[in-house]
Image (cartoon, helix red, strand yellow):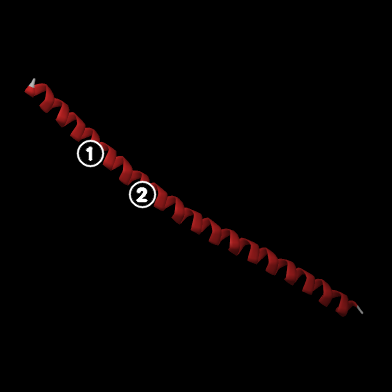
Amino acid sequence: MYQELRSLSTGVTRVETKLDTIGQGVTEVAKDVADHESRIRALEETRWRVAGAAAVLGAAAGVAGQYLMR
């Protein structure tokens, strides 16, 4: 009986250790996701700024072209 309880206790300890390891892994993944999210947002913001600058430059070139054609 004592041996069975000892074996059960050892098994529970192993499960607890594995659960702690899994919990740490989940925390690491959550940090990685947050980091990737901030990187993606920065890239998207830069992309839209470049697109806006291209539109402004295109409009300015059109106005300058019209002015020079007079």
Per the rendering, the mark at residue 47 is none
Report which quarter residue 55 is drawn in: bottom right
Q: Residue at x 40, y 53 (%)?
A: 31
Report which quarter residue 14 is drawn in: top left
Q: Residue at x 28, y 38 (%)?
A: 19
Quadrant (top left/top right/bottom left/bottom right) for the C terminus? bottom right
In this view, the residue farthest toward the right is 70
Report which quarter residue 9 is drawn in: top left
Q: Position of residue 48 (x, y in %)?
A: 64, 62
Alpha carbon distance from label 2 to label 1: 17 Å
In this view, the residue farthest toward the left is 2
Which three-letter amino acid code belongs to the residue tagged 1? Answer: Thr
Q: Secondary structure at mark 2?
A: helix
Position of residue 37 relative to residue 52, above or below, is: above
Name the mark nearer the viewer: 2 or 1: 1
Do residues under tags 2 and 1 come within 8 Å of each other at their CB atoms? no
Which three-letter amino acid code belongs to the residue tagged 2? Answer: Glu
Quadrant (top left/top right/bottom left/bottom right) for the N terminus? top left
In this view, the residue farthest toward the front is 1
Per the rendering, the mark at residue 17 is 1
Horizontal placement of 13 versus 27: left or right?
left
Tell me the residue that label 2 is attached to: 28
